[in-house]
Amino acid sequence: MNYHINDLPERTVKPRNSGLTMVMDKGLSLRQAEDFIEVGGEYTDLIKLGWATSYVTPKLDEKLSLYREAGIPVYFGGTLFEAMIVRGQFDDYRRILDKYKLQHAEVSDGSITIEHDEKCEYIRKLSEQVTVISEVGSKDVQKIFAPYKWIKLMTAEIEAGSWKVIAEARESGNVGIYRDSGEVRQGLVDEILTQIPEESIIWEAPQKAQQVWFIKLIGANVSLGNIAPADVIPVETLRLGIRSDTFEHFLKG
């Protein structure tokens, strides 16, 4: 940090197990990626190349090398996994992970219907190859899961080998754990946290109000996902209570 301020929340240090900031890269150029790393790399723990953008991203090898050299793990969005699974290309998907020297993979079923036992089997197989992050929840706004089902799915995926489970919200933040207005389904989150350790969950929170809500609920070291590159520094100030939205929350006395 550039100077000292008393009594700020203590942040975990990289490599973190909690307090992760997962950034969504939806198509940054190499120059933009370099600029992002210069400013936000210190505060970024994971980078997801959103959905299947890796298929059409120019100079993909060079971009992955930039992130790798900066010490930031990167992985392809779960929709790529789904696009290949539905076409019977699981082995091809595994070869892609090796080809691009990826150490993480996302397993999701937000766009396709798949038996959960089958999804867990994919998690088991991939966990022998890479660190698996699995996503729970549908991208379909009409599909609303009861809290007990979220807990059941998350528990099974962690037991199958997921390092972290992601609570689905899409890049827009209006499905899954949120209402279509972007408001948090508070009762759902409270129920999930009665059974699933908070350090096992990455909450997708692309909107500032959502980030503030989770920081106030869980603390500075809540894991947040789908953060826009331009929002990494603002999110870190929210975590530390040096932005108006969380300013009073972290004051002592």
Image (cartoon, rainbow, N blue to C red):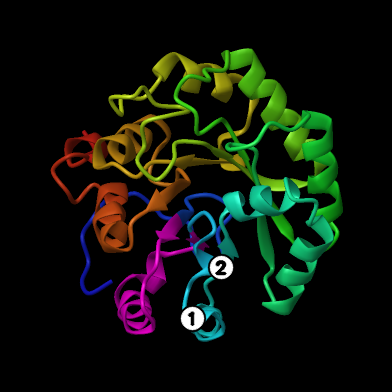
Residue 14 visible in image: no
Q: Please determine whether, in this image, residue 29 is positioned above or below residue 240.
A: below
- Asked if the stretch drawn in magenta spans residue 143, the answer is no
Secondary structure under the numbered disc 2 in the rendered image: helix
Q: Give residue 72's position: percent from left, percent from top.
A: 52, 72
Residue 25 lies in quadrant: bottom left
In the rendered picture of this protein, how many numbered marks are placed on residues?
2
The residue shown at (18%, 42%) is 247
- Asked if the stretch drawn in magenta spans residue 25, the answer is yes
The residue shown at (36%, 31%) is 174
- Give the residue at mark 2: 55
Q: How far is disc 1 from disc 2 in space, using C-alphas?
A: 13 Å
> As shown in the figure, which amino acid type bears the numbered disc 1?
Lys
Q: Give residue 121's position: percent from left, percent from top.
A: 85, 42
Residue 135 lies in quadrant: top right
The residue shown at (31%, 78%) is 32
Quadrant containing the C terminus is top left
Residues shaded magenta:
22-49
Q: Is residue 81 left or right of residue 33?
A: right
> As shown in the figure, which amino acid type bears the numbered disc 2?
Tyr
Q: Please determine whether, in this image, residue 128 is positioned above or below residue 100.
A: above
Quadrant containing the N terminus is bottom left
Nearer to the camera, 165 or 197: 165
Q: Give residue 71's position: percent from left, percent from top.
A: 54, 77
Using a 10 Å C-alpha cutoff, classify the residue at mark 2 as few (fewer than 14 neighbours), some (14 to 19) or many (20 or more): few
Give the number of the mark in front: 1 or 2.
Answer: 2
Q: Earlier in the sequence, mark 1 or mark 2?
A: 2
Q: Give residue 134's position: percent from left, percent from top.
A: 65, 44
- Give the residue at mark 1: 63
The residue shown at (78%, 57%) is 89
